[in-house]
Amino acid sequence: MDFAQIRPVILFAACFLNLIFAYLVWSKSKTREAFHLGWVALFSAVASFTWGGVFFFASNKLLWVRATWLSPFVAGANMIFVYYFTGKTKFLKFKVIFWYGFSMILAVIALTTPYIIYKVSDQYPYLSLDTAGLLNQLFRIIVLPYLVLPFYYLIGFYRKSIGAKKLQTKYLILGVLIYTSAALLFNGILPFLNYQKFFSYLDAPAYFSVIWLGLSTYAIISKKLFDIRVILTEMFVALIGLILLVQVFFAQGTQAKIISLAIFLLYLVIGYLLIKSTDQEIEKEEKAEKLAKELEELNLNLEKKVAEKTKELRGKVAELGESKKALINILEDNTEAREKIEEEKNKTLAIIANFTDPIIVLDENYKISMINPAAARVFGLSGADLGAPVKPDGKFSMANFKSVIKKDFQIKEIDKISNRRNSFISEEITIAVNDQEATYKVITAKVLGADNNETLGTMKIFYDLTREKEIDKLKSEFISVAAHQLRTPLSAIKWVIKMILDGDAGELNMEQQELLSKGYRSNERIIRLVNDLLNVSRIEEGKFGFNFEKADFQEVLNTAIGNLESLAAKNHQELRVRKPDQLPRIYLDKERMAMVVQNLLDNAIKYTPEYGKIDITVEVDKQSLHVKIKDQGVGIPQKDQAKLFSKFFRATNAVRLETEGTGLGLFIVKNIIDKHGGTVGLKSEEGKGTEVSFSIPINQAQIL
């Protein structure tokens, strides 16, 4: 029996073994890399079968030879497997389409055209000039990346891997190296160099695929790189099965072939049951070993806990002895401790009594328990008012004290303060003291016990703001006067520079025009600052005039966007407006509302980088109109957001990014919206942009 007779048998056996590898991979592992390795084994089985058909079947020889060019599917599937195994899953769908698509193109060209295999001579697999197609050598060169790239990726992944993954990669590299070397030698280098005597071994990679896929299967589905008994059992079953399969092919006569085939099929069933029983036995042993280990750990933990409890009990006994001694000492020092407590209490009362700011303390039953002299002087209270009840309604508002405090005072709510233990409102009161008006900020706090859990009462602390209010008023008056005085000369400077730039005083050269333009722009910024200062001054004095009327909000929106559209275009920014087709007519001040939208939109443009997007959203419900302006700018730090609508305040990152700005724009915006009976909202995350929104009522009655 020469090699030509057993050659197809070996190829069919390789096909059979590759099918076994595909079954093992798919049945024993559910990972993505195992799924694609199964396809590699399946395509390898198909490739081995086509080569077996070349040497086994006498008819349709040309079709069988062309069918061997389905083998690029093996390399394509292997590329996808390596991508998953090494974690290179970026653009994976595109890679799958590319590799399988390229393999499909090769297969279609090989099967349907003479460009790869022109015809088959009697001496095949020798490829003479009349046998190989025009593109045969070219396609062999094109297929080279299929073979080299997996090896390159695995080497790179091996250098970064550790532990079991590194060992798996080592087996995969060994298998790929063996298969790639055989493929490059017998299907690439030797055919390209036209060594005719080696052309009879074009099917050699099919033999080496068994070694490659055996190592790959072993690496992927192994548990602790396989139990040796499972390996030996499966290898023994596969070897005997291969021998029986060879016997089927070489049996003489039909009856002998049928008997050999029946024995082979029966052996497959018995072999499967043998492998399964071995696997089950190993699984039981692993469970028993795991249970024994858990019991051992439980026993060790139990002994450890007993030792710990014993040690703990001994410590408790020692502690009890020490506690006994300590208790005796405490009882002896009890009198001294009471005297110290009384002394500390007197110190505390003395401190509160000498506070220059008024303090009123309520007990847990909401009755006045203490009044310091400052409170008695400011509010006209006396010892007779101790024990007077005060309702806790309105979160302890000062309005509840009007039944106790006989002097008249006005209340202004500032904001609300909430935490886990309490919820209060922060207020300001104005009251006459010594024939002068005084302003106090009212701070409400819980009086807590030593452990901070028991509430002993509530305390009202009155912080004197009179001097601060007076200073603030003087500052506002100074700003108003200074702004008024600056406005006229600045306007004159503006028009003089404008006339010179327009050529009224003679022609200017380029350098002169540039210098004057810079001066003009700087003067414009100062004018805007002066206007902002005047607006703030008018707001604080109550002179910021409003002219409310029914108006179309679309006109307000168009005015604001029209004024800033060129600035956005200069920065290559996109303004996207989303609004209903029809906006209702709203009771508002058109000029002031345009100032609001323009101010918010100007901030969005200023702090959004070039080519960014700014969204303007207008929504309407039955009672209100809602406007949101969202940018892609630097965002506002969380710590700065609470103070953003205050005078002269700018976020720290905004100051670093944009040196120009007064910190007055949002203060003016909030005051205008408040005057319209609306609310202002802010959502921002540093580095991700800001959304400023406001809502205003539609009807006049809601504003009034």
Image: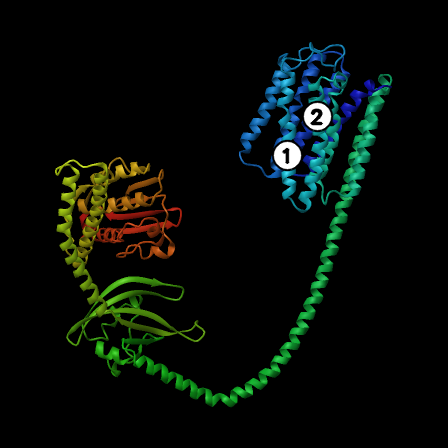
Question: In terms of image quadrants, where is residue 364?
Answer: bottom left
Seen from the viewer's position, the closer of residues 1 and 129 is: 129
Residue appearing at x 29%, y 71% in the figure: 391
Residue 232: give x, y in percent of width and height. Answer: 81, 39
Local SS, label 1? helix
Residue at which label 2 appears: 183
Against 390, is 678 above or below? above
Residue 230: give x, y in percent of width and height. Answer: 78, 40
* Amino acid, disc 1: Tyr
Seen from the viewer's position, the closer of residues 688 and 262 is: 688
Res 418 visible:
yes
User: Horizontally, is 158 left or right of 399 in the view?
Assistant: right
Seen from the viewer's position, the closer of residues 362 and 72 is: 72
* Amino acid, disc 2: Ala
Q: How crowded is mark 2: few (under 14 residues within 10 Å), some or many (20 or more)?
A: many
Q: Which of marks 1 and 2 is nearer the N terminus?
A: 1
Local SS, label 2? helix
Residue at which label 1 appears: 152
